[in-house]
Amino acid sequence: MARLVAGFLSYPVTVCSETDVMRLERELRISLEERAMAASIYESIGGADAVAAAVDKFYDRVLGDPDLAPYFTGYAVSGIKRHQRACLTAALGGAELYEGRDMAAAHGHLGVTDEHFDRVVVHLVATLTDLNVPGDIIGEIGAKLAPLKPQIVSA
């Protein structure tokens, strides 16, 4: 054990300058502020009950769309909804951790097109609007989810 510690201590150590420390503190503060904002989004829409209601209504819309419904043929929608609730909860700052596959692994084999991704977004916005989520909050939710598009679209 002493050799291990001595070996570890022999690695070169970089001392951070005051500027580096200030930059790291600023980045950490921004990260914490983003997390607080995300938590407020989750809380502001009503938490777990609201996410569950939104996911149910959202999938009613998506499964009723003749262009999107075929993507779900042969899949247990209850499991997809469970993953969607966990994913949204995590993305919006709730306490639940998303432990599913990453978006590319989950969607890559489906051949999702840009057009179909955009239709899903339209259904999400309509769902949130129907649930009286304010437009600015819908925009914040969209900003959290938009970066996922390149991982989901594969055709």
Image: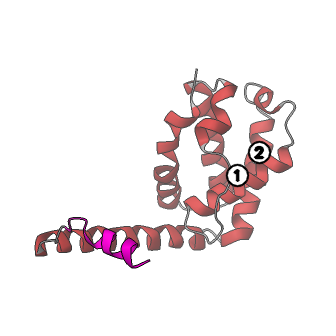
Where's residue 19, x and y in %? 12, 71
Q: Is residue 99 above or below residue 107?
A: below
Where's residue 113, x and y in %? 59, 24
- Magenta span contains residue 5: yes
The label shown at residue 84 is 1
Give the left or right position of residue 90, taking residue 1 as reference: right
Give the amino acid at mark 1. Answer: Gln
> What residue lies at 60% left-to-right and 47% top-to-bottom?
125
Bounds of the magenta segment? 1-13
Quadrant of the rendered structure where residue 131 is?
bottom right
Q: Is the residue under label 1 in contact with that under label 2 (CB below 8 Å)? A: yes
Q: Mark 2 against mark 1, which lies toward the viewer?
A: 1
Regarding residue 121, the answer to whether it shows in the image is no
Between the C-alphas of marks 2 and 1, the distance is 10 Å
- Magenta span contains residue 127: no
Is label 1 in a helix, a strand or a loop? helix
Residue indicated by mark 2 = 59
